[in-house]
Image (spheres, helix red, strand yellow):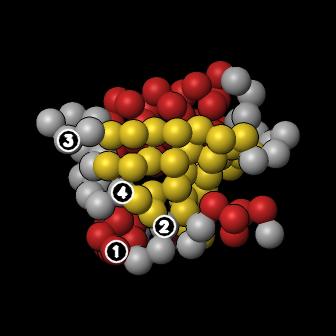
Amino acid sequence: MPDLAIETKKLSDDWLAISVEGEVDLATADELSTALDNALTNGIKHVVVDLNHTPFMDSTGLRTLVMAHRRMAEEDRDLVLAVEGGPISRLIDVSGVESSLRVVASVEDVLS
């Protein structure tokens, strides 16, 4: 089973970055879901998920992000994906998720 490393970092009073390193799939999507749930229960207003070190994501991982986005949008919160190029960008493009989720190239882009 591939390892998944998830690190959270508070960027400001309102923003939290969740950095994901490794494959997000059926075996690891629950770890990402837990990190997103923790951000919601801790009252974080905005979350950026950094996928720039994620070489692979299947539909389970994508569904985890979409469901978190829906929950956050219902509470007037933002979920942003940070990814530039590579297979994850292609997955986002092909799935059409970019039409409902904000996608930026890097974590720093959400603060500028």
Residue type for callout 4: Thr
The numbered disc on residue 71 is none
Task: Tell me which residue sits at (24%, 44%) in the image.
Answer: 25
Residue type for callout 1: Gly
Q: Relative to residue 46, is residue 111 depicted above or below?
A: below
Asked if disc 3 and disc 2 are in contact, CB closer than 8 Å, the reply is: no
Tag nearer the camera, 1 or 3: 3
Residue under label 3, please give it: 2
Residue pushed farthest left?
1
Task: Tell me which residue sits at (32%, 49%) in the image.
Answer: 22
Residue under label 1, please give it: 86
Task: Tell me which residue sits at (75%, 47%) in the image.
Answer: 11
Helix, strand or loop at mark 1: helix
How far is the residue under mark 4 from the one under mark 3? 12 Å
Helix, strand or loop at mark 3: loop
Residue type for callout 2: Val
Estimate how packed mark 2 is, as few (under 14), some (14 to 19) or many (20 or more) residues with alpha carbons within 10 Å.
Answer: many
How far is the residue under mark 3 from the one under mark 2? 20 Å
Q: Earlier in the sequence, mark 1 or mark 3?
A: 3
Estimate how packed mark 1 is, as few (under 14), some (14 to 19) or many (20 or more) residues with alpha carbons within 10 Å.
Answer: few
How far is the residue under mark 2 from the one under mark 1? 8 Å
Q: Earlier in the sequence, mark 4 or mark 3?
A: 3
Q: Earlier in the sequence, mark 3 or mark 2?
A: 3
Asked if disc 4 and disc 1 are in contact, CB closer than 8 Å, the reply is: no
Residue type for callout 3: Pro
Task: List x then y, in percent, for residue 13.
Answer: 84, 40
Image quarter of the C terminus? bottom right
Residue under label 4, please give it: 54
